[in-house]
Amino acid sequence: MSAPTDVARLLSNHNADLSFQRPFYEDLHERPELSGQEAETFAKIQDLLERFNCEVISPIGGFGLCAIFRNGDGPTVLFRADIDGLPVKEETGVPYASTRVRPRPDGTMTGVMHACGHDMHTAALAGICAIMDADRDFWNGTFIALFQPAEENATGANAMISDGLVTRIPRPDVCMGQHVMPGRAGEVQTMPGAIFAACDSIRITMYGRSAHGSMPHKAIDPTYIAAMVVVRLQGLVGREVDPDDFAVITVGQMKAGTTNNIIPDSAELVLNCRFFDNNTKRRIYSSIRRIVQAECEASQSPKPPEFEFFAHGELVDNSPEVYTTIRPTFDRVFGRNSVEATRWSASEDFSNIPTAFRAPYIFWTVGCTPHDVWDEAVANGTVDTDVPVNHQSTFLPDYEPTVEATTKAGAAAVLTYLSE
């Protein structure tokens, strides 16, 4: 029999007890933690992994950990899930909704919620571990389950790498991951090439000369400089990016001054930029510098502007070879629910991990919207307004079809490489 047929058969009759998944998921959802603060989540994952025959390497990069399942000679496959929550006050109304309030890095308090589905990702990988542990007769090689902290602030993958990830676990031959997204719950969406955008945030500080608000002629107004920069930035995508290409430049923050009657001596813009092509990214970053520097010069700014790049996310660019290897398995396992993905302008730090290992990789998405909600929105043309999306306070995956699809998809992809 072909590998896709064998994998599909196993996943229909696997020996794993997955009854732990729902209470594990609901516990994670009710008690989310912000990026870099995932101590409780870390402990819960460690406790759960004790039920399996695996080697746990932890901590790595703060609250990261890896479970290594060895089963003789064969390839090594790594599967990653992220574990952190978001500073969002939950408004889903479910019995296990989060009511937590936690401090941000700046000390201010915020509600905390799993508004991006990382609790589902973690529960799914736990289920994949259960299947791989219970059905060792079906596969050979090494399976690595990697639980990553701090994805939301784009620091977790690099923190694990900086903490020696590449020397502390076996080198994977292929890396994998997945993300729940708006879409018909249970649909597994795959594609080769770029699927999640590259991103950076840029903090730009522009300098002026302070003066009394009644004497603008004695000042160099950095607020005016910043305002002109904002206007000019809007023309970059429309006038310097090929209409067949893609770019986003969002001005997320604009800060200047402390009171109404003082022209300040500096202003700050914080941009969020996203691309599907690294050449386009380089051209746009050069243009942003050109515009900011030109506006500062035009206003006779007393010192050059400063640029700080942070929250970097690499392009997630799926290997065509890995895609063509696992897609037949997904088609066999999920039938009509195995569909072609569309690119998402959201960003991920997942690809930093396979890049560190110089390994090919694939990252796919799974629909998580209740069928009735999705189908009605599609029929009415109201998907953009009626379907909750990641990072919203009402975002909540439809549990049963989503956990089944994410668990089976992960296991199917891993077993495609490791099954006998």
Image (cartoon, helix red, strand yellow):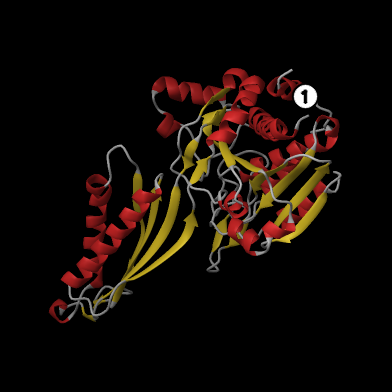
Which residue is rendered at x = 15% and y = 82% of the image?
218
Which of these two is toward me, 301 or 85?
Answer: 301
Along the horizontal axis of the image, is 159 left or right of 252?
A: right
Q: Residue furthest left?
A: 217
Say above or below: 341 vs 90: above
Say above or below: 173 vs 287: above
Position of residue 411 measured from the top left corner of the image (x, y, whole percent): 71, 33
Position of residue 93 measured from the top left corner of the image (x, y, whole percent): 60, 39
Provide the residue designation for mark 1: 10
Position of residue 17 measured from the top left corner of the image (x, y, whole percent): 83, 32
Which of these two is toward me, 116 or 155?
Answer: 155
Say above or below: 178 vs 2: below
**Amino acid beneath label 1:** Leu
Along the horizontal axis of the image, is 283 left or right of 64?
A: left
Q: Quadrant of residue 267?
A: bottom left
Which of these two is toward me, 96 or 281?
Answer: 281
Along the horizontal axis of the image, is 16 left or right of 389?
A: right
The number of numbered discs placed on residues in the rendered structure image is 1
Which of these two is toward me, 157 or 377?
Answer: 157
